[in-house]
Amino acid sequence: MNSSTTNIAPAHLAEVRVSFRTAGFAALAMFAILAALPLLTLVTGDAFVLVVATRIMIFALAALSLDLILGFGALVSFGHAAFVGIGAYAVAILNAYGVNDLLVQSLVAVAVAALFALVTGAISLRTRGVYFIMITLAFGQMLYFLMISLSAFGGDDGYTLPARSTVLGMPLLENNLVMFYTVLAVLVGAFLLARMLIASRFGRVLRGTRDNAVRMQAIGFSPSPYQLTAYVIAGSIAALAGVLLANQVEFVSPAYMSWQRSGELIVMVVLGGMGTLAGPIAGAAAFILLEEWLSSFSQHWKLGFGLILLLVVLFSKGGVGGLVKRLLGGAHHG
Amino acid sequence: MRGLLSEMLNLFLLQALNGVQFGIMLFLVAAGLTLIFGIMDLINLSHGVLYMVGAYFAATFVALTGSFVLGLLLALPAALLLGIVLELLVFRRLYERDHLDQVLATFGLILILNESVKVIWGAAPLSVPVPEALTGSVQLFGNVRYPLYRLVIIAAGLATAAGLYVLVNFTRVGMLLRAGASNAPMVSALGVDIRRLFTVVFGLGAMLAGLAGALVAPILSVEPGMGDSVLILTFVVIVIGGVGSVRGAFIAAILVGVVDTVGRTFGPILLRTMLDPSAASQTGRALAPMLIYILMAAVLLFRPMGLFPVRGAVR
């Protein structure tokens, strides 16, 4: 049986251990820079930096959660934006019914996302390879079309939130600085949780299955429950990103869960380096900064973006992963 | 009561025909894609873009020549050419890569082609007139009339499907296709230029997608991104039918087309017998677009490899 058609080259164990530690330091450095960023904006007085940085961290959170299944489980999920959308719509729909508390909204978002991940994951994980890619894509689109047809919550036009969510009745998030540190705290928390998971027995089974599913089965592990659990955890974290995204822009739209968004999340993970946890954070930053930068030249910036993506994949040996590895490797030895 | 019933029946038949027409169009896009999956083991996200480009080619050439038939005859080789160029420039380098690289590269290609279309033709939708001779409608059964042009689409699609069936099952190229799907290295070892075969499959797939785009151009608006939603539906079709199976793609395409079209009309009507009207139309409108995905999930629950699983063979 060809149990894993999506073959992502298994990394050498020692190399993994080193890169795991390196990734830890890289993440620590990134978090330190982010935590100090508001000081910089105090000096320059430019609040826009804060807004972009918050956006980067929100997408970093979503990309980080995708890395759990893509990088450590070799599950190429093309419907991850659906979970971000579930989080965003949890905020919008609860708001329409008068529930504005951030914690309640987050709890509902995580619960619904976990349930959706459990059901769709159980079906999707019966398949492998291209089937898995296409099925996760289709489930994502299913939710996208559902939200478009829900005219009570804006349908295609989206839903404008009257205000950001409250925390214990206080409008704390209205302050961009509080928003910034809230997102940073969630991101750091998710990073630590993911790191703990990956280092645990659970994470070792997941990685073992990624590297060689047949061997894992031979030593007595059934991969599916582990992969499904990872899928549910990843979906729940992505829903939190959706809750934060809805709050930051005070607007919710089906476009958040379109398949292009899912594709962008994959690009972030792969550009930054799969299976590193720190990589997706850097990938999200690179993606959003590149988007900001290219769109300042022309409204047709996607043309340039697509070209860069295509050329990187085509002309770097081993794809984007190979390029990143060589760049990192060069930095180590040089 | 009898009047209402026959009215319902007429509506059902009309919607079923619309569904078949939609399904035929999906099949034209899916046929090429399923062959590319099955033979080259390549996941090509940009196949929907070829459908869009086909529609744009048709719009341009019809406007240039003033004749729909001439426009179509020019659009097809143009789509074929684009497919071959893309194969030589991009896809050829992707066969050996893992699926993730293929996803990323073809995702980039979508961004490039969608944006290029905006640059060349503008973001505003174009419209293509229905050819003069094919306007109007014909009487089918009772007092049901159906647009002639849609019937022509159905006929053209069926003819193409038949042609494809003959090509795959009774010709030398078809034999090589089937052999390539079951064991490409062996075909190559027997002295067949497998690379050229891949290029042929790619050009053929691009031309079929382009044909679908060109055929529906007069009944849909031609706009950037029109291929994206079709791509997803095509994936659903291929997953239901079984990757690599042209026969499976045909049956699944008709199934998806009919379920989607009929479901959108009759979902709310059926629900109205159970719920109050406003709740029924709300729920119906929300559920109808999800029907085909539920269908797909149901099929996969019982047959994870689709209805016509192919283990390295094109059928």
Image (cartoon, rainbow, N blue to C red):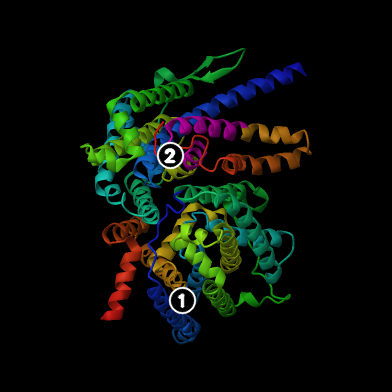
Percent from the top left, x then y, of residue A75? 48, 58
Residue at the far front in the pictured view: A219
Specify whether disc 2 shares its chain with disc 1: no
Q: Nearer the viewer, mark 2 or mark 1?
A: 2
Predominant secondary structure, magenta span: helix
Residue B245 lies in the magenta stretch = yes
- Can residue B207 be seen here? The reply is no
Secondary structure, mark 2, is loop
**Label 1 lies in what chain?**
A
Residue A79 or B60: which is nearer the viewer? A79
Q: Amino acid at mark 1?
A: Val
Residue A5 lies in the magenta stretch = no
Tell me: residue A130, above or below residue A296: above
Which quadrant does the C terminus of chain A fall into?
bottom left
Q: Amino acid at mark 2?
A: Arg
The quarter of the picture where residue A299 lies is bottom left
Tell me: residue A121, above or below residue B303: below
Q: What is the span of residues highlighted in magenta in the rendered image?
A: B234-262
In screen coordinates, is A152 left or right of A268? right
Tell me: residue A275, above or below residue A259: below
- Can residue B273 be seen here? The reply is yes
| Tag 2–tag 1 contact (CB < 8 Å) | no
Which residue is label 1 attached to?
A: A49
Tell me the residue at 28%/76% (across/down).
A330
Crowding near the residue tagged with mark 1, few <14, some 14–19, many ≥20 C-alpha atoms within 10 Å: some
Tell me: residue B247, above or below residue B147: below
Secondary structure, mark 1, is helix
Crowding near the residue tagged with mark 2, few <14, some 14–19, many ≥20 C-alpha atoms within 10 Å: some
Which residue is label 2 attached to?
A: B311
